[in-house]
Amino acid sequence: MVEILIVTSVIAILLAASSSYFSSNVALRRSVDNITANVATTLQLIKLRAGRSGVEFRAVFANCTTLDESDPDCIKCNTYSDYTAGDEEINIMVQRGDSNRNSANWCIQSEQIKEFQSDIDFVTSGNMSEDPLAVSFLPTGLRSDFRDDPADETISIEPLEGAQVDKCGIVEVAAVGGIRVVHGRWDGTTCNAILDPAPTPGPS
């Protein structure tokens, strides 16, 4: 009887540990997919809003540390705090410019905070505009810096070193305004796109 109780206890402990491990991995995968899709959707929306309003719109990926509320019709952010690896959230702020190009003032339209597991990192390409880190669009649908930077700007959601998840995501924004989303597998250094299986040939 004692032996049966011991074996039952060991099995229960093993089941609890494995359940916790798999639940953690599922949460990480969902977090990667969720943030990747959210970033892409936000960029699509601000691109549409720029076209409809006739002025620049941008998505800022930083926290506002000094808010300027002197003009209630145009609340602005004067200073920003950048995301750093290991943070458990990323702030995404939508801002409206005051011109159709080279806006000097940016009014905050909305913001959201996306929480994710600390095992996930938010990485951007070196050609993205900084201070603050942002992607902006002209009313024509082009990226605001299309004349100066023909390369794609990329935002990657990827595991930190040692994380127990192999899922990753990339959002690419072309200079001409195209937005491409890649869902992939992380091999330790690169996010490799998950390819759709080849179609099964039908009867000839």
Image: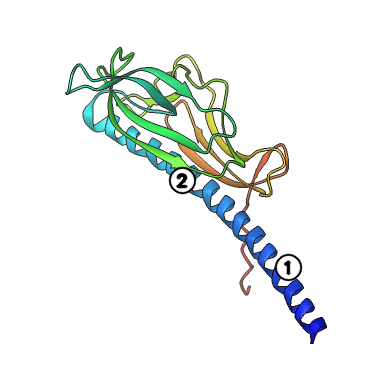
Q: Is residue 106 left or right of residue 145?
A: left
Q: Name the quadrant containing residue 62.
A: top left
User: Is residue 11 depicted above or below 95 in this figure?
Assistant: below
Q: Amino acid at mark 1?
A: Leu
From the top left corner, tell me how far across and down residue 196 is, in percent: 60, 56
User: Is residue 161 depicted above or below 197 in this figure?
Assistant: above
From the top left corner, tell me how far across and down residue 66 is, in percent: 35, 19
From the top left corner, tell me how far across and down residue 24 is, in percent: 61, 55
Q: Name the residue rendered at 69%, 63% in the picture.
A: 17
Q: Which residue position is annotated with label 2?
A: 37
From the top left corner, tell me how far across and down residue 79 is, in percent: 39, 16
**Labels 2, 1: front one:** 1
Q: Which residue position is annotated with label 1?
A: 14
Q: Is residue 120 left or right of residue 79?
A: right
Q: Residue furthest bottom?
A: 1
Cα–Cα span, label 2 and label 1: 35 Å
Q: Name the residue rendered at 58%, 41% in the picture.
A: 118
- CA neighbours of label 2 inside 10 A, class few (<14), some (14 to 19), many (20+): some
Mark found first going from the N terminus, 2 or 1 = 1
- CA neighbours of label 1 inside 10 A, class few (<14), some (14 to 19), many (20+): few
User: Is residue 25 depicted above or below 74 in this figure?
Assistant: below
The quadrant the C terminus occupies is bottom right
